[in-house]
Image (spheres, rainbow, N blue to C red):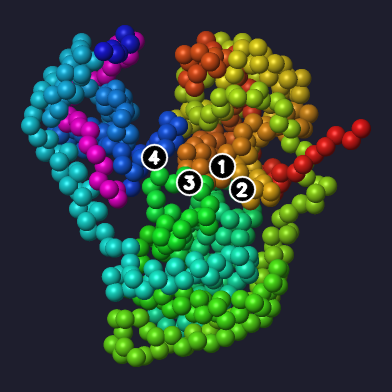
């Protein structure tokens, strides 16, 4: 059985002991409960079918620590969450040891008795845990009270109309800047502006913006290439209804090409975005009715005018359709007149807006990718401030900033772990290039594969840019780690660092110890907007003799 380190035990013994009884348990997550646990730094994917570890103060009625793990994670995870409940509890709790811990699992009780010895904590078994039972009942009530994704009276018709759009494949005809106006004049809506996604073969769907202002504002913020946090805010700031398409097969890979799947494997997903509501994955009656007639009008327009749109051709075309009102209207024979029009002038404006952000080929900087050794282990993380002081005094190589602000949970760092000889070469190469000046993440695109990336870049003292990592633009693990990175760098006023470590193939792979850390380079972080490169395009380069 794994035991606590003596130093950890002494540290816990120094915590004040409070007259409280804590409850602890590990239970399967109720389907549909969103996880709010920070899993990014651990480097694992969120598990919708995972298990929740809870430690609560039964005397105070407060949650001290919570975590979500995969079902195959060992019992050690329960102890890790317990130690966090003691040392770093959720606010407004203070660090402390309880006088007593109760659990309803005898196997867990036996495990805790072996781990927590000498901490003066009474451990006991109880058949039920009232506070944790109440918390999980609350989870279940929240899920059961959540409205369905679609109002029942519209669900079948909406799904059928969405599948019609899938068969129409408007993404084979329109780019996302070629906007269609759909005049509804009902349900407090005047005109919806349809933007088609999917020409790059990435995500298929249609966004129905409630205003041109929302559409333009979102595009301007995307083209600004700001931080990942700003991009997330821009996404949630849209004002639109939407339908997107996903695979309904759980075993499908995330990057599977939906166009290769049979129709029975395609599932439409509906939702709403609004600056004050954020993302909502269900529709209310009026929203569903409006989206239903908009999809039907779009389907008829595509069927009637498909042949008029060639490659890059987006002529002025307009048609009006009479569409039956949805089922729940009082008059089952009533119809609504819907006008669908192309907006060529708006398409030119949006295209010009995008072209203004694209650099000429000659202006693109050369980004070298020969600095970081191949097959290195790379991670984004944080070094506690006391550990940073130790590194500064003990690392073999150290290049320090003078005005580092100690704020937040620690010093944000990029960690590169490789073999000792390659680490030495990397260190010398950075010194020869004038040291490390800045660390940046910049959007990138591969036009040959229609893929988007988040590129990790080092800028050295001689002005050169060096690629240290390519991260998928839709990778949830990296997106969460990037969000943490941006938040930490903001708190330190842009101060960050690079740690170069050895031990790639040893027991410390992925978790280098202090003795493995060979160099610390402190630098400044830059946003993509500050770097000013725009979206970097992958290009083929050849040496001319």
Identify the element where label 1 is drawn.
strand
**Residue 104's image quarter?**
top left
Decide: is 204 above or below 502.
below
Name the secondary structure under disc 4. Answer: loop
Q: In this view, does 533 lie above or below 422?
A: below
Res. 254 mark: 3
Q: Which of marks 4 and 2 is in front?
A: 2
Residue 478, percent across and down?
51, 38
Label 4: which residue? Answer: 46
Residue 130's place in the image compared with 313, above or below, is above
Of the residues under marks 3 and 2, which one precedes in the sequence?
3
Question: Which of 245 and 145 lies nearest the eye of the viewer?
Answer: 245
Q: In which quarter of the image is residue 37?
A: top left
According to the picture, the residue beneath numbered tag 1 turns out to be 472
Residue range corresponding to the magenta coloring: 7-33
Among numbered discs 1 and 3, the one appearing first in the sequence: 3
Q: Name the residue under label 2.
A: 451
Residues at discs 4 and 1 in contact (Cβ within 8 Å)? no
The residue shown at (24%, 15%) is 115
Is disc 3 surrounded by few (<14), some (14 to 19) or many (20+) residues within 10 Å? few
Disc 3 to disc 4, C-alpha distance? 14 Å
Q: Are marks 2 and 1 in contact (CB under 8 Å)?
A: yes
């Amino acid at each position: 059985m794994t035991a606590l380190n003596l130093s950890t035990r002494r540290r816990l013994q120094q915590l004040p002991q409070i007259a409280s009884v804590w409850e602890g348990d590990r239970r399967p997550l109720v389907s549909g409960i969103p996880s709010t646990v920070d899993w990014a730094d651990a480097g694992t994917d969120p598990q919708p079918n995972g298990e929740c570890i809870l430690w609560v103060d039964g005397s105070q009625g407060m949650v001290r620590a919570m975590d979500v793990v995969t079902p195959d994670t060992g019992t050690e995870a329960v102890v890790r969450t317990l130690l966090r409940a003691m040392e770093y509890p959720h606010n407004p709790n203070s660090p402390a040891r309880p006088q007593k811990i109760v659990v309803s699992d005898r196997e867990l009780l036996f495990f805790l008795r072996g781990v927590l010895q000498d901490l003066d904590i009474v451990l006991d078994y109880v058949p039920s845990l009232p506070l944790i039972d109440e918390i999980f009942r609350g989870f279940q009530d929240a899920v059961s009270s959540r409205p369905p994704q679609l109002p029942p009276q519209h669900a079948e018709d909406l799904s059928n109309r969405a599948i019609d759009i899938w068969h129409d494949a408007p993404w084979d005809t329109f780019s996302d800047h070629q906007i269609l106006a759909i005049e509804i004049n009902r349900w407090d809506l005047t005109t919806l502006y349809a933007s088609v996604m999917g020409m790059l073969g990435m995500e298929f769907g249609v966004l129905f913006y409630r205003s041109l202002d929302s559409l333009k504002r979102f595009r301007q913020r995307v083209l600004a290439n700001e931080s990942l946090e700003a991009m997330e805010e821009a996404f949630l700031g849209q004002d639109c209804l939407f339908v997107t398409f996903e695979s309904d097969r759980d075993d499908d890979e995330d990057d599977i090409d939906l166009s290769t799947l049979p129709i029975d494997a395609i599932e439409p997903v509906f939702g709403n975005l609004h600056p004050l509501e954020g993302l909502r994955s269900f529709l209310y009656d009026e929203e569903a009715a409006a989206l239903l007639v908009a999809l039907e009008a779009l389907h008829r327009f595509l069927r009637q005018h498909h042949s008029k749109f060639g490659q890059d051709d987006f002529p002025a075309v307009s048609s009006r359709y009479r569409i039956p009102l949805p089922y729940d209207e009082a008059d089952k024979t009533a119809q609504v007149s819907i006008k669908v029009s192309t907006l060529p002038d708006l398409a030119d404006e949006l295209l010009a807006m995008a072209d203004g952000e694209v650099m000429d080929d000659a202006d693109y900087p050369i980004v070298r990718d020969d600095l970081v050794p191949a097959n290195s282990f790379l991670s984004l993380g944080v070094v506690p401030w006391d550990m940073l002081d130790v590194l500064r005094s003990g690392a073999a190589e150290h290049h320090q900033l003078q005005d580092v602000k100690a704020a937040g949970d620690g010093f944000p760092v990029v960690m590169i772990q490789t073999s000792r000889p390659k680490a030495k070469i990397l260190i010398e190469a950075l010194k020869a290039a004038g040291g490390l000046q800045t660390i940046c993440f910049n959007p990138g695109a591969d036009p040959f594969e229609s893929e988007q990336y988040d590129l990790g870049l080092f800028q050295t003292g001689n002005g050169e840019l060096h690629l240290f990592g390519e991260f998928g633009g839709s990778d949830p693990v990296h997106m969460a780690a990037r969000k943490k990175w941006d938040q930490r760098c903001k708190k330190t006023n842009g101060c960050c660092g690079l740690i170069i470590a050895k031990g790639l193939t040893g027991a410390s792979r992925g978790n280098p110890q202090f003795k493995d850390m060979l160099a610390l380079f402190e630098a400044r972080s830059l946003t993509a907007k500050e770097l000013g490169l725009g979206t970097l395009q992958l290009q083929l380069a050849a040496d001319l003799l």
